[in-house]
């Protein structure tokens, strides 16, 4: 991905035909090859890492926070406030900036590869569930399952509205709410709008544990839809836009657990059809992700063209042209109206996507099947969670041996008594454990 990302910006400006060809070529190499390979694998991380519902919900929450919130902060805050004034219209500066960003992404991608594990796949392999299922049979199973179809429709609405908001944001700030490239409107709007996405994560997790993903998502999307109405009414008012954006962000928080809901749906397909369709689902999700960008960009560009959009034109020092009323109305609709429709649609979909309520029965049955399969071969079945506990115990044992070895070396070097230093360490450890147990006991009483 690092190489193909850089290739996107290595396009000559002198020859228009060559530029067109290279833009089409590098775009397709990136999205059809590099992005597809990575995104399919990343999408499967939550469903295949664990079958424990609570662990999966937490993993989905923090994974999507990293994928959506952190890049959003960079694009919405850092770029307009810090980078754009520096980069300006310089091709060379933009190229250097993208090379640096692509290089920074590489080590984090490598870390994800080495520090994730497909425990659900391992459990299926240990149970002997390694048969290959034909694509036609997988398609039939997936499209014949109402929860899977609803999840795909949800993802389609989610991606189209998200892309429309991302594409139209700078236009809305430049031509409706603020003035062209003023350097403050987008920064302020994004700062306030993104603020709840940080601390709100810690409020969301207890709500998900208490009420469940589906109910929290329905409530959140309706809150966000109401916020979009406020934004539409006050599209030219910074105070109303800030208030609406802040409320919208609070309502949007539950979307961070959608990948856990996808994992629940895949478990249900395995329960109903006796097969897993993780790869197929990830492929379709990747297609939706990729195509949605084109759909969003196409709709937005068509709207700008048909409403008479004019490119930025400097009239006098620091003063640019303004867009006509039709163009401003379309930009507002793209930034506020389409997301409003999408949020209502997603809330309605969630009303019928009740797969989460069936999980206790589903997981009990899947565990029983795998256990029976292992016992029929004379093997002992270990769930993904049990395997993770054993692995953690082994890692703790190795770490403890290493600690003792290092402490002995330190004592020998400094002339200290190993027994005394070890006793001090164990005393601190016992004190820490006692405090944690007291805190847990106090929490349980409440």
Image: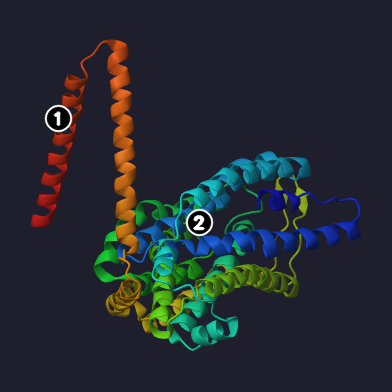
Q: Quadrant of the C terminus?
A: bottom left
Residue 98 appears at what percent x and percent y? 68, 45
Q: Which residue is label 2 attached to?
A: 67
Which is in the foreground here, disc 1 or disc 2?
1
Q: Is residue 337 visible?
A: no
Q: Which residue is label 1 attached to?
A: 427
Residue 55 appears at what percent x and percent y? 33, 60
**Nearest the camera: 361 or 250?**
361
Residue 309 appears at what percent x and percent y? 73, 67
**Nearest the camera: 8 or 411?**
411
Q: Quadrant of residue 255?
A: bottom left
Tally of marks: 2
Residue 39 vertical position relative to residue 80 in the rendered view, above or below: below
In this rendering, position of residue 417 left or right of residue 47: left
Residue farthest along the front direction in this orientation: 378
Q: Which residue is at 67% across, 68% downward? A: 297
Q: Which residue is at 53% across, 54% downward? A: 72
Q: Which residue is at 85% across, 61% downward? A: 21
Q: Is residue 34 visible?
A: yes
């Amino acid at each position: 991905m690092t190489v193909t990302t850089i290739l996107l910006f290595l396009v000559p400006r002198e020859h228009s035909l060559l530029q067109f060809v290279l833009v089409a070529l590098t775009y397709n190499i990136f999205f059809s090859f590099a992005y597809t390979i990575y995104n399919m694998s990343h999408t499967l991380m939550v469903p295949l890492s664990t079958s424990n519902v609570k662990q999966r919900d937490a993993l989905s929450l923090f994974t999507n926070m990293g994928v959506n919130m952190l890049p959003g902060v960079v694009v919405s805050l850092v770029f307009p406030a810090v980078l754009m004034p520096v980069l300006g219209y310089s091709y060379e500066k933009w190229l250097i900036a993208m090379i640096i960003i692509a290089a920074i992404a590489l080590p984090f991608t490598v870390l994800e590869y080495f520090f994730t594990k497909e425990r659900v796949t391992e459990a299926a392999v240990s149970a002997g569930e390694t048969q290959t299922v034909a694509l036609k049979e997988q398609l039939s199973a997936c499209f014949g399952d109402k929860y899977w179809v609803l999840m795909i429709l949800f993802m389609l609405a989610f991606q189209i509205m998200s892309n429309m908001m991302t594409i139209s944001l700078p236009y809305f700030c430049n031509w409706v709410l603020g003035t062209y490239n003023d350097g403050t409107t987008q920064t302020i709007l994004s700062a306030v709008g993104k603020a709840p996405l940080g601390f709100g994560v810690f409020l969301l997790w207890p709500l998900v544990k208490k009420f469940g993903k589906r109910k929290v998502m329905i409530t959140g999307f309706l809150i966000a839809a109401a916020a979009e109405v406020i934004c539409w009414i006050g599209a030219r008012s910074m105070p109303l836009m800030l208030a609406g954006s802040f409320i919208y962000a609070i309502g949007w928080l539950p979307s961070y657990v959608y990948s856990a809901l996808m994992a629940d749906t895949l478990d249900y397909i395995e329960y109903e059809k006796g097969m897993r369709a993780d790869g197929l689902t990830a492929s379709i999700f990747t297609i939706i992700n990729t195509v949605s960008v084109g759909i969003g960009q196409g709709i937005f560009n068509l709207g700008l063209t048909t409403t008479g959009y004019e490119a930025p034109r400097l009239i006098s020092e620091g003063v640019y042209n303004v867009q006509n009323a039709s163009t401003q109305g379309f930009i507002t609709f793209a930034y506020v109206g389409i997301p409003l429709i999408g949020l209502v649609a997603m809330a309605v979909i969630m009303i019928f996507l009740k797969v989460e309520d069936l999980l206790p029965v589903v997981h009990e049955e899947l565990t029983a099947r795998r256990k029976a399969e292992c016992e029929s071969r004379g093997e002992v079945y270990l769930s993904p969670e049990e395997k993770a506990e054993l692995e953690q115990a082994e890692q703790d044992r190795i770490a403890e041996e290493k600690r003792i070895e290092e402490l002995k070396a330190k004592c020998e070097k400094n002339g200290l008594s190993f027994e005394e230093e070890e006793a001090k360490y164990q005393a601190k450890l016992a004190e820490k454990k006692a405090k944690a147990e007291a805190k847990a006991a106090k929490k349980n009483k409440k």
